[in-house]
Image (cartoon, rainbow, N blue to C red):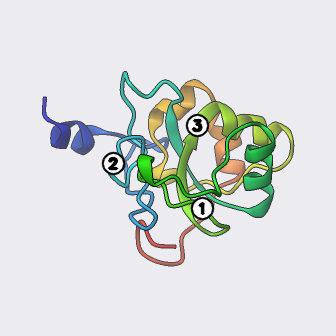
Amino acid sequence: MSDNEILRDARNVLGGPLQACSFDPLTGFERTGCCETGPDDIGQHTVCARMTEEFLAFSLAHGNDLVTPRPQWRFVGLEPGDRWCVCAARWLEAWEAGVAPPVVLEATHEAALLVVPLEVLRSCAWQARTGPAER
C-alpha cells in the first residue's frame, strides 16, 4: 500500500476522511500536514490541536519545547493559534490539568480514540472559521 493510499484511507475521530491539520506550519509526524500515524510514530501524534499559550507553557514544563525552532527537524516553532499534531497522551494530560487546547475533530486521527475518549475530544472541539489547514 502506498503512502497516498494510507492517507486516502485514514479516518478521523468522527468516522469521516482525515482532513489536513496544517500546512503552515507544516505538521504531522511525517510532515505531510495531516495527523496520520504509523509504526514509527511512537508518540502517536494524532490530535490536531489549535495551540494556546497555556498549552505551549504546559508542554514546555513537561519537557517538550514546542516554541523554539528546530530546523534540523523541519520545525519552525509554534505560537498561539497555530494548528499542530500533538501526542494523544500529552493532550489528555493537558486536559486533565485544565489546559487542553481546542481540537479540530475532522483532522484528528481515529487512533487518538485509543487514548482519549471521543466525549472528551468533543468537549474541546474547535470549528475552523477558515478552510482546512489554515490558521
Q: Quadrant of residue 103?
A: bottom right
Furthest-front residue in this view: 72
Residue that mark 2 sits on: 17
Please state which amino acid type lies under the numbered disc 3: Cys
The residues tagged by marks 1 and 2 sit, at their Cα atoms, a distance apart of: 26 Å
Q: Quadrant of residue 24?
A: bottom left
Looking at the picture, tell me which residue is in the foreground, 96 or 26. 26
Mark nearest the camera among 3 and 2 is 3
Furthest-bottom residue in this view: 130
Q: Considering the numbered disc 1 on the image, is that residue within a helix, a strand or a loop?
A: loop
The residues tagged by marks 3 and 2 sit, at their Cα atoms, a distance apart of: 20 Å
The residues tagged by marks 3 and 1 sit, at their Cα atoms, a distance apart of: 15 Å
User: Who's the residue at 48% across and 78% down the image?
Assistant: 130
Please state which amino acid type lies under the numbered disc 1: Leu
User: How far from the left and from the top, in percent, is residue 20?
Assistant: 38, 57
Q: Considering only order in the chain, which callout, 2 or 1, is on the residue closer to the N terminus?
A: 2
Q: Which mark is residue 87?
A: 3
Q: Is residue 31 left or right of residue 97?
A: left
Q: Considering only order in the chain, which callout, 1 or 3, is on the residue closer to the N terminus?
A: 1
